[in-house]
Every structure is written in C-alpha cells, then in structure tokens.
Amino acid sequence: MVDDAIRSNGQKVDRRIGAVLDRFVESIIHEVPRRRGARPSTANALADLIATFMTNNAAHDPAHSVQWADDARRQLFDNWLGGIALRHGLRAQTLRPASSDASFRRYLRIEGTGTTFIIMDAPPVHEDVRPFVEVAELIRAAGLNAPRIVERDVEHGFLLLTDLGNRLYLGELQAAVKTSDSMSIAQLIRDATSALITWQQLVDSRGLPPYDEALLRREMQLFPDWCVAREFGHSWTHAQQAQWQTVTDLLVKSALSQATVAVHRDYMPRNLMVCDPNPGILDFQDAVRGPISYDVASMLRDAFISWEEEQEIDWAVRYWQQARKVGLPVPDDFGEFWRQLEWMGLQRHLKVLGIFCRLKHRDAKPRYSEDLPRFFRYAHRVATRYNGLGALARLMEPLMGETRTDVFY
C-alpha cells in the first residue's frame, strides 16, 4: 500500500523505502520511546534512503534527475555531500542539473538553509579544480563578483559554490535584441566593460600561466587539425601549409607584442551573469597572463551573439577610453588598438573553429558546430581586410562553400 502511494510518474520507488516507511508509520502509531532529541532508527534509515534515492533515481522528477557515469563517482559524491550537508542545511532531494559546459565539468543546484548553492562536479581524471579555486580567490580579492568557494574536495573534484542565479548575460542580451531594447543592451555592456577594466587593473596576473608562443601556436593548430582535416576532410598542399604558417607567425607576433594583463580567455555573455553586483563572472579557470586586447575581442565578437561592426567599434572605443583613463597599457592610437583587437580576435576564432569541431568529433557534443558559420564570417572578414592575411581568406573559402575568381587587368 505504501509503495503505491509513493509512485512517481509511473515508476516504482525502491521497495526498501516502502519497507522503512511501514516501520516508521508503525513506530509513530505505537509511540516508540526514544532519547530526547534523537530520531527513531527507522526515521534515520528513512532519511538516509530517501536522500540516496532522490539523488540517484530519476523517478522523483525526470526533469530534475541527476545521472552519474558510474557508481564509484556517485558514491564519492554521496559521501562528500553527506559530510557537508548538515553545516549548510543541504537537502539532497532538491539536487538538480544547473548547467554544463564544453569541458567535462558540470554544475548542479541544491537548496540549503535560506539559499541555493551550486555544486561543481569535475572528475579529476579530466579536470583539475585547483585553478578554479585559485582564480576565484583572485577575482574576489579584486572586488569583482565571482562564486565563493564554500566547501571543497580538491582530491575528488567537488566544490560547493555560492549561486549567482539563473540570468545569463546571453539570454538577457538576446531578449533585449528581440524587443529592440537598446537601453538594456547598453547597460549590460557598460557593466561588463567596467568589470573588465577592474579585472585588468586589479586581478593579480603574476601567478597565472603565461599566454606564451607555445600556447598560442598550439591553439592555432586546432584549426587545421580538427576543422580543416577532420570536419571537412581537406588536405592542404605544401604551398597552402606554408601560407598557413606565415599567417600563424603574423598573428602570434602581434599577440606577443601587446602589453600583458590577467586574461579570462572566455569573457563572453555566456560566462557572465546578471546579478548584484553586476556582472557575476564564471568559467574563469583557464585564466592566463596575456595580451590586453584578448578579453575585449571575446566580449565583442562572441560565440553565440553577433553585433554590427559599427556597434563593435563604438564599444571598443568606450573600452579604450576607460582603459587609458585608468592607466592600462593600451596603445595611444585607437586605430592600432583596433588592429590588435581584430588580429587577436582572429587568432581566437581560428582556435574556436578547431575546438568546436573537436567537441563534435572527439567529445560527442555536436551542438557547438552549429555556430561554425558565425566564426567563419568573423575570421574571413578580418582576413580580407589586412595585408598579409589574404592567404588565410583563400584557405577558408572552400570550407565556407565560397569560390573566388581573381581577375587581373
């Protein structure tokens, strides 16, 4: 009878819970004596079983179910959560997916005493949570809004974080574009720009890994390896490979010539939250010490939303003016800064084209490849604009479905 009462969405609940419920009801009916403040053993068993069931069984709510790749990982999580739950009033039955990203990390939301928390699940075989912890502390020390680390199990890759909410910059900007709400768009970008200025001023970059030549070239190589060869099945001739090498050299030289600051590496609307203070900053674990134009390019030429170039230039000018006012090492000439930004953005976009194709073919995450056309447009536009980069445009055009006819008079 109890089993029937606790069925959810047509699925049978673990019969162990039913048996414990029967004993629990019987203990209440007969008013089993117990020590003051102690729960009956049946109540203890019931709480433990329900907590485990609600964490691991989709029957309670399929939309909010949490799946685990293997029982060993699930058991590690249950043990960790059980050890910290009482301190924060965490309720396992409220555990649900919050978001995932392009890595092996995922984020879960759980309710606690008077608030919600975010749990990062980052299997150590794939991810190291220590950079996230270290950079989070640097960001908060700079007075910016990043999640606070409430609890940590670095060895097993579990973090309990403060919850910055559900309002992604990306969704807010997309909604504002749809309703032609230019004032909201302007305010969001102003806040993001001001936070970036503070980041570049105050986030201590001395302990961050350098964005050096080896890393820049490694990122660039993702494009021919995963986009050209794997996604499109093209093989470059020796002459085309030489052209690619020349372009790579130019872009790497431009990046290394810039002044260096702390670089987020993904400072874009999908990693910013609308909250107080605004914005909340996420996904910063890959921060490095590198070119000052990098995060501006990421913000203006995003993976998931595009702007007219006139608007990009307007926002870039505003950033440049603020940066000069506070003494950040940007070029005195805006034209030179804009070239640096475009070339830095081109390096990033070629890298992203490779990463999105790798996510599709290696990591079984094909949805990212839907945005390949956006990045091809970004990259092609810059490659056709500057001396020395024209060969790159010709290398990309067959991948874009474009043909070129050169006419000479």
Image: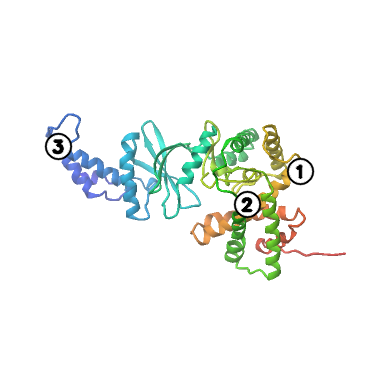
Question: x, y (%) of residue 120?
Answer: 42, 45
Tag 2 residue: 348
Compared to 363, does 255 lie above or below? above
Q: Residue furthest right?
A: 409
Work out which quarter of the rendered image holds the C terminus and state it.
Answer: bottom right
**Residue shown at 37% from the left, 42% from the top:** 95
Q: In the rendered view, would you say 247 is above or below 303?
A: below
Q: Which residue is mark 3?
A: 27
Q: Quadrant of residue 230?
A: bottom right
Find residue 371 and report its horizontal and vertical position in percent: 59, 53
SS of the residue under disc 2 = helix
What percent of the width, then of the height, locates residue 135? 51, 41
Disc 2 marks which amino acid?
A: Arg
Q: Amino acid at mark 3?
A: Ser
**Which residue extends farthest front?**
206
Q: In whole angstroms, how far apart are the C-alphas of marks 1 and 3?
A: 79 Å
Q: State whether residue 182 is above or below residue 394.
A: above
Question: What distance separates the C-alpha of mark 1 from that of mark 2?
Answer: 20 Å
Place residue 162 in its image quadrant: top left
Q: How packed is label 1: few (under 14 Cα within 10 Å), some, or many (20 or more)? A: few
Question: Is residue 109 among what the camera can see?
Answer: yes
Q: Which residue is mark 1?
A: 335
